[in-house]
Amino acid sequence: MRKGIFIIGTDTDAGKTFVTAGLTYALKQNKKDVIPYKPVQSGGNGDTRFYKEIADLDYSIEEMNTYTLKEAVSPHLACKLENKKINKELILNHYKKLINSHDYVIVEGAGGIVVPLVDKEYYIYDLIKDLNLEVVIVARAGVGTINHTVLTNEFLKTQGIKAKGIIINQYNNKFYEDDNIKQIKELTNLEIIHKFNKLEDFSKESIEEEYKKIDENKLIELIF
């Protein structure tokens, strides 16, 4: 059975791209047919290039992305600056093509859950509902994350979107981070799927070492 999941962040710098590439890497290393998909990316095509480089993917940028916008701002504003408008049908058709040709599709959002794709008309949460996907929340480990993560999950509930669990990113093994994670788990009643350590050396080798810590069997069980 072909399966998809949507990766959302509690905020812009939570690390969605790092996590999306990591999940892709883990599945690919275990011989799974997986493709990451970034429907809309602002600020150029750095996210999809990161997928390609880190996970050693043969896919083209165009296979993994529908809209690339130049300015590193919210998609609705980037579209205004470039005189473009996002057509949701193009994204839905692109996803349909991917899910019909791959066993796993990992969709990465743009920013947080309430980011507008079309001003006053269409938001990330609308796209998730149209794709009929469940989500994984990417949250930072540090100060402020309890509020961001719990509010994100509560908003998902109001939209009828199910969160499968939470991935913690930028973990520094601090006592307050452990308490943050404990509080988040208790307040959301969601599984903590994995913790990614914060990397001081952001090289391909150090990133791959971090990705190798992912339990692929647990990943499939909890997410898919």
Image (tube, rainbow, N blue to C red):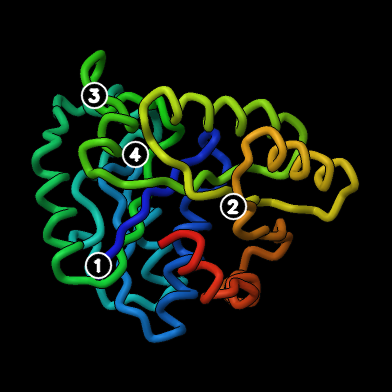
Mark 4 surroundings: few (<14), some (14-19) or many (≥20) residues within 10 A:
many
Of tags 1 and 4, the one toward the viewer is: 1
Query: Mark 4–mark 3 contact, CB under 8 Å?
Result: no
Task: Give the position of the N terminus as an image quadrant.
Answer: bottom left
Number of other residues with Cα within 10 Å of mark 2, as a class: few under 14, some 14 to 19, many 20 or more: many
- Which amino acid lies under the numbered mark 3 shown in the image of this protein? Tyr
Judging by the rendered image, the residue that carries numbered circle 2 is 167
**Badge number at residue 122:** 3
- Horizontal side of residue 173 vs 194, given as left or right: right
Q: Which residue is mark 4?
A: 42
Helix or strand or loop: what does disc 2 sit on?
strand
- Measured Cα–Cα span from mark 4 to mark 3: 16 Å
Upstream in the sequence, badge 3 or badge 1?
Answer: 1
Q: Secondary structure at mark 3?
A: strand
Query: Which amino acid type is shown beneath numbered disc 1?
Result: Arg
- Please provide percent x and percent y for residue 11: 54, 33
Q: Secondary structure at mark 1?
A: loop
